[in-house]
Image (tube, rainbow, N blue to C red):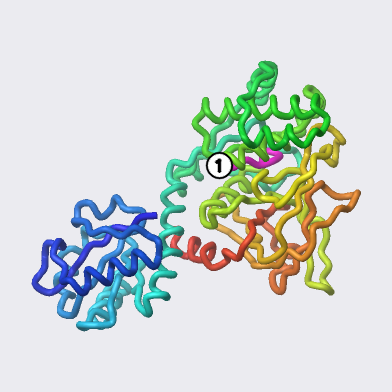
Amino acid sequence: MKANVYYIASGNKSGDVMNPKNEQFVKDLSKKSGVEMSYTSLSELKEGELNLVFIGGGGTEGMFLEVFDSLPKPILLLTTGENNSLAASMEILSFLRQKQVPGEIIHGSLEDMSRRIQILARVFQTKNKLKGLRVGCVGESSDWLISSGVDGEASREKNGIEIVKVPMQEMFEEIAKKSYEANEYTKMISDTGYKPEEVEKALEIYGALKRICEKYRLDSVTIRCFDLLGPVGSTGCAALAVLNAEGIYAGCEGDIPSLIAMTVLGELSGQPVFMANPSRILSDKKEIIFAHCTLPITMPLTFKCMTHYESDLGVAFQGELQEGPVTVFKCSGLLDQYFVAGGELVENLHEANLCRTQLRLHMEEGLDYFTTRSIGNHHLICLGDYTEVVKEFFRWMNA
């Protein structure tokens, strides 16, 4: 990740001269945070994933005012604990609030500032990723997803996300080619030794969906996968598992809001994301069980091939995930509602009456959301606690 730094200090209007102590301060921040920070001119500032205005000392408020109109918003003020840098930044922040311009002072210990920069870099990198994101839907949403539609025009205008509709017939035509390019992930599935004919059929579906992604330049894709059951006699579970491992976010049932949510969580966390149904809530134990038949093949510690639960066809996956902290997330298709909560994966289940990968999570907070204000049925899970960065993303989403 990268950050552009525009420097303002007394006697320096060009932003290209920095005293050695402040220069070392930025180098230390860059090294500690892992975010590549480089000085830039005012005209180049907008090109960064994260833009910082370094207030190098006191007496700079007037100089800030001179460049204010040219600065990209929101305005993030980088400060030191010396030379009245913080005091000047506080005056500037007060001015920003009067102008109703979002902003923040980044200040504190090297560790605290580095962590804050890491979070902000991930947030603004994800915001930039969404602008121009191409989300594909092969076929229509499944009939039961009655609350999961997205207005394509509104999505493009509000968030820059382009929704691309692909006819299901085109998918069938691609499947009929019976071809795919083998890779390390298809080999992982083939090497399980599970029903070679079924594996081959499932990977041909992967090849078809991959070609559609390439043709339409899709960053993410979802498919009306139950329409494959009759004509093809297989499912899309393996295709989605491999595409997710390759870095193309891929979801089930033509669920566009869940696909957008998967993309957001994946970009914010840098982790593989499991799209699943809440299947059972155990309120007395503060537990919830999630299950689905596909997940990124890179996500579990181990996996076992099985049939798809509802149809008993194709190749689905029973994954064993690392126990420990998880993030549970969902947002609306237009990103105007969201839910996020941390939890603990306490057990991988193997029940006969649920989809193949089954997770039992302990959640101290948030279980009432699922029964009172849930955003659809599918939810997204990644390993690790990323609740803070998700909340920060929505704080800055429209800033």
**Seen in the image, is 311 located left or right of residue 15?**
right
The image quadrant where one finds the N terminus is bottom left
Residue drawn where x is 61% and y is 42% of the image: 245
Dot 1 alpha-carbon crowd within 10 angstroms: few under 14, some 14 to 19, many 20 or more? some
**Seen in the image, is 119 located left or right of residue 143?**
left
User: At which x and y percent is residue 20?
Assistant: 17, 71
The image quadrant where one finds the C terminus is bottom left
Residue type pointed to by label 1: Gly
**Seen in the image, is 10 located left or right of residue 266?**
left
**Most extreme residue toward the right, as rendered?**
352
Q: In the image, is residue 324 above or below residue 358?
A: below
User: At which x and y percent is residue 12?
Assistant: 11, 68
User: At which x and y percent is residue 52?
Assistant: 30, 64
Residue drawn where x is 61% and y is 63% of the image: 384
Please say whether residue 319 is visible from this viewpoint.
Answer: yes
The kind of secondary structure element at disc 1 is: loop
Q: In the image, is residue 113 above or below residue 248?
A: below
Residue drawn where x is 41% and y is 57% of the image: 124
Q: In the image, is residue 113 above or below residue 191?
A: below
Q: In the image, is residue 190 above or below residue 399?
A: above
Residue drawn where x is 32% and y is 69% of the image: 28
Please say whether residue 223 is visible from this viewpoint.
Answer: no
- Which residues, given as a range, are shown in magenta? 248-254
Is 43 magenta? The answer is no
Q: Quadrant of residue 358?
A: bottom right
Residue corresponding to mark 1: 247
The total number of labels drawn is 1
User: At which x and y percent is residue 184?
Assistant: 62, 35
